[in-house]
Amino acid sequence: MNETADDNLPRLSEVIERHGLSARKSLGQNFLLDLSLTRRIARTAGTLEGFTVIEVGPGPGGLTRALLLEGADKVVAVERDERALPALDEISAAWPGKLTVMHGDALATDWQAIAGHQPVKIVANLPYNIATPLLTGWLTGHSWPPFWSSLTLMFQKEVAQRICAGVGDSAYGRLSIISQWRSDAVKMFDVSPKAFTPPPKVTSSIVHITPRAEPMVDCDVTVLEKVTAAAFGQRRKMLRSSLKTLGGDPAALITQAGLKPTMRAEEVDVAGFCRLAKAASA
Ligand code: SAM
C-alpha cells in the first residue's frame, strides 16, 4: 500500500494510531490509507485548479491530502467525528489557507452557503448510511445549473449501478431517473473492500456526475419524484394501475406523455418519466 506522499505529512496509519481513530461503524468509517488510490479518485474529478472542493467526511484525511496535492484551490471538509479534528488540523497547518474543516452533520449542512459564488466540485468517500440522501439533495435543487460543477463520489457498487442504470438494466429505478434527468452519471471504477481499513463487506465504486445545462424534458422535480415513486413502488404493475395512487385519470396522463398504459415502470425511459411528470403538473 502506498501511504507516502509529497506533502511530508505522516503516514495515515500513524495518524490513525496517534489520534485514536478506531473506526466507528455507526459513522460509516472505512478509511482509505493508500494515497495513490485517493489521488486517483481526486484526478477523476478533472482539474481541481480554480475550484473549491467540498469534501464530506474527511476522517483522517487521506482523500483531503490527495485533493490538495492534485491542485485544489481550497478544500472545505465537513466532518461529524470530533476525534478527527486534530488530525485534520495538521493538514491545515501543512497547507496554510487551503483547508477549512467544519465540524458538523453533512445532512444539516447548507452547501449553497459554503459554495457562495465560487466554482465548486464535490468529491467524497461518502459514509454509506447517508450517501443516497446527500446525493438526492444535490440532484434535486430547484435552481439549475446547480452550485456544483461535478460530483465525484464513492458508493456501494450496487448503489452506483442504480445511479447509472438505463432502461432495460435490472438496477434501473427511481435513483437512475433522479440522477439522469438533468445530469450525466458515469460509473468510473470499482474499489475492492481490501482498499479500506477496516474492509467493508461489499465492493465500492466511484461515480462521476456532471450537470447538463438543460433537463432532458423540463419538469418539476417534486412531481418527477412523486411519479417515479408511484410507478416503481409497484414496478410489476402496468402504469395504468400503478399511477392510480397519484389520483386523477392515469390513462389520460399516460397518453399525454406518449406512453402505453400497459407499460411497466422498468420499460419507461428517463425522458418518458419527465414527460409523465410534465403531464401530471399541467
Ligand atoms: N474520507 C475518509 C477516507 O476516504 O478515508 C473517510 C471516509 S469514511 C467512508 C466516512 C467519513 O464520514 C468518516 O470520517 C465519518 O466520520 C464521516 N461522517 C459520517 N457521518 C457523517 C455526517 N453525518 N456528516 C459528516 N461526516 C460524517
Image (cartoon, rainbow, N blue to C red):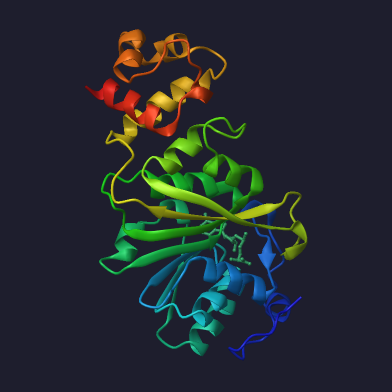
Ligand 1, image quadrant it occupies: bottom right
- Residue 119, percent from left and from top: 32, 68
Residue in the picture at 39% in, 28% down: 273
- Residue 89, percent from left and from top: 52, 81
From the viewer's perspective, tell me whether residue 263 is left or right of residue 145: right
Q: Residue furthest bottom?
A: 8
Q: Residue furthest left?
A: 282
Residue in the picture at 42% in, 11% down: 261
From the viewer's perspective, tell me whether residue 233 is left or right of residue 161: left
From the viewer's perspective, tell me whether residue 52 is left or right of residue 67: left
Indicate whether 7 appears above or below 38: below
Residue in the picture at 36% in, 66% down: 120
Indicate whether 256 appears above or below 120: above
Indicate whether 162 appears above or below 198: above
From the viewer's perspective, tell me whether residue 147 is left or right of residue 265: left
- Residue 202, percent from left and from top: 73, 49
Name the image quarter holding the N terminus: bottom right
Name the image quarter holding the C terminus: top left
Label count reads 0
- Residue 115, percent from left and from top: 32, 65
Please name whichever residue, 95 or 275, is drawn nearer the observer in this view of the structure. 275
Residue in the picture at 49% in, 38% down: 176
Please name whichever residue, 121 or 278, is drawn nearer the observer in this view of the structure. 278
